[in-house]
Amino acid sequence: MMENMAKFRNIVVHRYDKVDEYIVINILKRHLNDFLVYRNVIVDTLSQN
């Protein structure tokens, strides 16, 4: 899951001009919890430093 989230993030950040908004909305609807988990891992990692 984390690998897919990182790939999604990279596409949105670096290729935002080619992102289909309907695909993004569907991903958000189906995988919102994955974003929350991804965020929590990043926050936890940053908190350790």
Image (cartoon, rainbow, N blue to C red):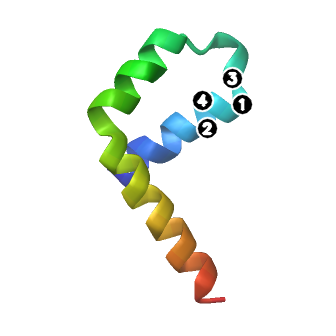
Q: Which residue is mark 1?
A: 14
Q: Which mark is residue 15?
A: 3
Using the numbered discs, state the Cα–Cα distance from disc 2 to disc 4 in whole angstroms: 4 Å
Q: CA distance from mark 3 to mark 4?
A: 5 Å
The residue that mark 2 highlights is 10
Instruction: Please name the residue that numbered disc 4 is placed on.
Output: 11
**Disc 1 to disc 4, C-alpha distance:** 5 Å
- Name the residue: 46% across, 68% down: 41
Cβ atoms under marks 1 and 4 closer than 8 Å: yes
Q: Residue at x 69, y 23 (%)?
A: 15
Circle 2 packing at 10 Å, graded few (<14), some (14-19), many (20+), is few
Pointers 2 and 4 in contact (C-beta within 8 Å) = yes
* Mark 3 and mark 1: Cα distance apart in space: 4 Å
Residue 32 pos. (x, y %): 35, 41
**Circles 2 and 1 in contact, beta carbons < 8 Å:** yes
Q: Secondary structure at mark 2?
A: helix
Residue under the point 72% across and 30% down: 14
